[in-house]
Every structure is written in structure tokens, then in C-alpha cells.
Amino acid sequence: MFDMMGMMGKVKDMQARMKEIKDNLVHLTAEGESGAGLVKALVNGNKQVLRIHIDPSLLKESDQIILQDLIVAAVNKAMQHVEEKTQLEFKQKTDGLIPNIPGMDLGSMFGGM
């Protein structure tokens, strides 16, 4: 028999857990690098760039275009890494709360993690 009250309670629990996860994403960080570590970017789970490190050997005027490309590559890698961490965090925090229904993305129902 379908337990509507139980399901509503689970939905409320899921919403509270999703808010907690979103609030904690600021503390989740990931780093991306390019050019064998010459350029590094640090981002948080809110997809904000926190820090860019550029090796001093790259700070020559003639290397400006290369430097710009390396910064873009490092930031993109950091964003990819933090997205992977965010998905893992979401999965760990919601594990067992709502049954896994094949083909149904419940994460998008609760804020599109």
C-alpha cells in the first residue's frame, strides 16, 4: 500500500539534505592545471574561481597568448574536477533516502545538482 505521508516526509528530508549540500559546496574545492603545472586554478563547489597560480617563468610579454590558453585550460579542468566531486557528494548525502528508479534523475527535481 502506498504511504503518502511517508513519501512526503522523505521529500522533505531530501529537500533539507539538498539545502545542506548546496550550503556546503563552498567548502568543496578542486584544482586544475595545465602546462605541466605552470598554470593552476582552484575553484569551489559553487563553481567560483578562488585562485589562479601562474609560474613566474611564463610572465614574459611574448608568451601572453600561450598564458591565456593555459589559464582557460586550467580553469576548465578545475571546473570538471569540482563537478565530479559535487556529484559524488550529492550521491553520498542522498544514498538510501529515495529509492533508485532507473531512468529517473531525482537530482534534477531538487535543484539540479
Image (cartoon, helix red, strand yellow):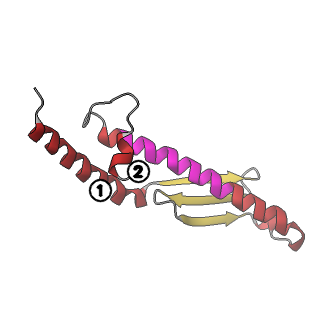
Residue 4 rendering spot, x and y as whole percentages: 11, 38
In the rendered image, the quadrant that contains the N terminus is: top left
Quote the CA–CA distance across marks 1 and 2.
12 Å
Q: Secondary structure at mark 1?
A: helix
Residue 55 found in image quarter: bottom right
The amino acid marked with disc number 1 is Lys
Residue at image x 52%, y 64%? 48
Label 1 neighbourhood size at 10 Å, few (<14), some (14-19), many (20+)?
A: few
**Numbered mark located on residue 60 in the image:** none
Residue 65 rendering spot, x and y as whole percentages: 83, 66
Q: Is residue 1 left or right of residue 52?
A: left
Q: Mark 1 sits on what residue?
A: 19
Magenta stretch bounds: 74-91
The amino acid marked with disc number 2 is Gly
Q: Secondary structure at mark 2?
A: loop
Identify the mark nearer the N-term, 1 or 2: 1
Q: Is residue 43 left or right of residue 54?
A: left
Is there CB contact under 8 Å for labels 1 and 2? no
Residue at image x 41%, y 31%? 103
- Please name which of the two marks, 1 or 2, marks the residue nearer to the observer: 2
Residue at image x 33%, y 52%? 21
Q: Is residue 4 left or right of residue 50?
A: left
Residue 101 position (above or below residue 94): above
Label 2 neighbourhood size at 10 Å, few (<14), some (14-19), many (20+)?
A: few
Residue 38 rendering spot, x and y as whole percentages: 74, 57
Residue 51 position (above or below residue 102): below
* Count of number-bearing discs: 2
Residue at image x 9%, y 41%? 5
Q: Is residue 76 magenta?
A: yes
Q: Is residue 60 magenta?
A: no
Q: Mark 2 sits on what residue?
A: 112
